[in-house]
Image (cartoon, rainbow, N blue to C red):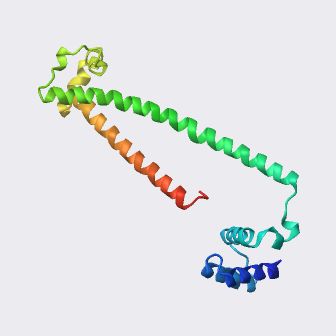
Amino acid sequence: MANELIDYVNYLIDSKKGDSGRLGYILSALQDGKSLYNSDKRYLDSLISTYLGSSKKKSGDQKSVEELKVELARVKERLEKFEKRGYKKPVGRKAVFFFVTSFFGWHAVITLLSAKSLLDIKDINPYLLPFYLLEKIIPTQYLDYVSQIGLSLPKIAVLSWGAMLMVWIILGFIYLVKFIRSRYNPGR
């Protein structure tokens, strides 16, 4: 089998198929009797199947129809697991986080408008801004402690909204990097 692989690699190098440097390394490893890395094996197998076709492959390497069906069923099962795990859970978390961000955003926008004297919060229906109803629910000792720090509920709403917007930006960059990496490394 090693002599056959050496012949395949020599043919690929002579016909200028694939990366000649990597193929040279693979050829020297095969000639020295060293074992190849898995990535080199996959690379060589893909080149052989692409450029040499199944006629040059050893007939013992071909799989039967039953083995292919079993392998296909296994791949389909793994794909279903990835889809269930990969799509359903994060969508729910993202939807909740989006709702919370919108909720705090609504309060933050109203607060910022009232700070510019364009709007008076007291004139707005309290049910339209339920976050400010917390002042009536939270005991005054906690509100006094928060006000000593220099915060009020409107400021907390604005700060929370700003923090959530930053998290959205960071998440966006993370998913962008993952997407770009998946395009350059399809095996991941």
Residue at the image point whose x is 20% and y is 31% from the top: 151
Looking at the picture, how far across and down is residue 99, in whole percent? 40, 29
Up the image or down, 92 lies above or below 12; here it is above
Residue at the image point whose x is 14% and y is 29% from the top: 115
Looking at the picture, how far across and down is residue 171, in whole percent? 42, 45
Count of numbered circles in the view: 0
Up the image or down, 187 lies above or below 44; here it is above
Looking at the picture, how far across and down is residue 125, in whole percent? 24, 13
Looking at the picture, how far across and down is residue 49, in whole percent? 74, 68
Residue at the image point whose x is 34% and y is 38% from the top: 164
Up the image or down, 26 lies above or below 124; here it is below
Q: Is residue 135 left or right of residue 87?
A: left
Residue at the image point whose x is 29% and y is 27% from the top: 106
Q: Quadrant of residue 89?
A: top right
Q: Is residue 6 left or right of residue 18?
A: right
Residue 21: tell me if it is visible: yes
Give the residue furthest to the left: 117
- In what quadrant of the picture does the C terminus appear? bottom right
